[in-house]
Amino acid sequence: MNQNDQLPTELVEIEALLAGRRREKTPDELRREVLSDVRAELHAPLKSNNWWSFAASVAACLMLAMNLAIASVNVSDYSPSASTRKANVDETTRLVQDLLPELTDKQARRHSMVLGGARPSPLP
């Protein structure tokens, strides 16, 4: 099945007219001018070498680093080591929730696992 079979007849006619039209050749002088302008732009020094652009670049890098740090903390999973017993983690979780009631159950469990000697697992 040809692609033109799926198109309406008006579009097939327009496509045929466009394919059959005479193509103009670009003048050599215009081609040389465009290429020289492109080369000049590629080799030109950056024009924004001021303090504000440097400060904005540093701020953007810091924001990216903070976002990555926050994301890594949110996806970190703490697995108890062999010496950390489940009963100790549950008891410590209850104590953490008593001290800090604004924490969610998951956050309190993370804190209790760290207090119990758990190590963060590597990120996926």
Image (tube, rainbow, N blue to C red):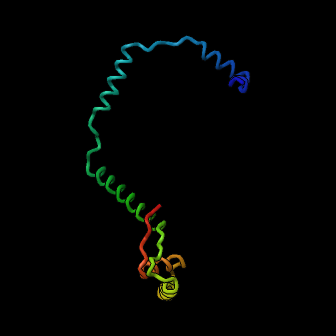
83 or 52: which is nearer to us?
83
17 or 97: which is nearer to us?
97
In the image, residue 89 sits, relative to residue 36, either above or below, namely below
In the image, residue 122 sits, relative to residue 23, either above or below, namely below
| x and y, in percent, of residue 95 in the image | 49, 88
Residue located 47% across and 88% down the image = 99
Rendered image quadrant of residue 28: top left
In the image, residue 100 sits, relative to residue 3, either above or below, namely below
In this rendering, does residue 58 appear at all?
A: yes
For this view, does 48 lie left or right of residue 13? Answer: left
State the residue lying farthest toward the top. 22
| x and y, in percent, of residue 116 in the image | 43, 82
For this view, does 86 lie left or right of residue 63? Answer: right
In the rendered image, the quadrant that contains the N terminus is: top right
Residue located 43% across and 71% down the image = 120
4 or 115: which is nearer to us?
115
101 or 84: which is nearer to us?
84
Residue located 72% across and 27% down the image = 6
| x and y, in percent, of residue 48 in the image | 29, 43
In the image, residue 11 sits, relative to residue 68, either above or below, namely above
| x and y, in percent, of residue 114 in the image | 43, 78
